[in-house]
Image (tube, rainbow, N blue to C red):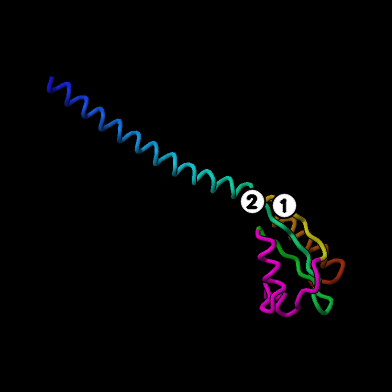
């Protein structure tokens, strides 16, 4: 009887340890999986700002409102928008997937440079 109780005690202890491990692993996995999903599905906005002195700025962000506040504040959101404060947003490309946003930003910048000149964008 004593051996049987001892076996049950070991089995109960192992069972508790396994349950605890599964619980901790599932919580950790949930957070890792959530982080990966956010990164994969993260969307960006590409935007064109018309600035003072006939200058333009092309930028991208995953936090549009916050970035616009930065650009339009007195401190400016970038070196360019500090030198040439933005007047208005000309165009926005919203919900651009992460894998495409840098290429689209480069394309929009190149098109604006061809249209308005390299020194104005």
Whole-percent x, y for residue 40 in the image: 61, 47
- Which residue is depicted at the point 67% across and 50% down? 99
Q: Nearer the viewer, residue 91 or 121?
A: 91
> In x, y percent, where is residue 49?
78, 68
Where 73 falls versus 13 (above or below)? below
Q: Is residue 119 among what the camera can see?
A: no
Q: Residue at label 2?
A: 42
Residues shaded magenta: 63-89
| The N terminus: image quadrant | top left
Q: Residue at x 21, y 28 (%)?
A: 9
Which residue lies under the disc numbered 1?
96
Check residue 27 for magenta coloring. Answer: no
Front-most of 21 and 39? 21
- Does residue 57 appear in this view? yes
Q: CA distance from mark 1 to mark 2?
A: 8 Å
The residue sitting at 25% across, 27% down in the picture is 11
Q: Secondary structure at mark 1?
A: strand
Q: Quadrant of residue 45?
A: bottom right
């Amino acid at each position: 009887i004593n051996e049987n109780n001892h076996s049950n005690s070991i089995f109960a202890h192992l069972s508790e340890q396994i349950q605890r491990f599964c619980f901790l692993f599932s919580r950790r996995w949930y957070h890792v999986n959530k982080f990966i999903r956010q990164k994969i599905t993260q969307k960006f906005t590409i935007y064109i700002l018309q600035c003072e002195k006939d200058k333009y700025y092309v930028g991208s962000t995953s936090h549009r409102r916050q970035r616009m506040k930065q650009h339009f504040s007195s401190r400016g959101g970038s070196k360019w928008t500090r030198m040439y404060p933005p007047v208005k947003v000309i165009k926005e490309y919203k919900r651009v997937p992460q894998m495409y946003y840098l290429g689209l930003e480069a394309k929009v910048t190149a098109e604006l440079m061809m249209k308005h000149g390299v020194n104005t964008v």
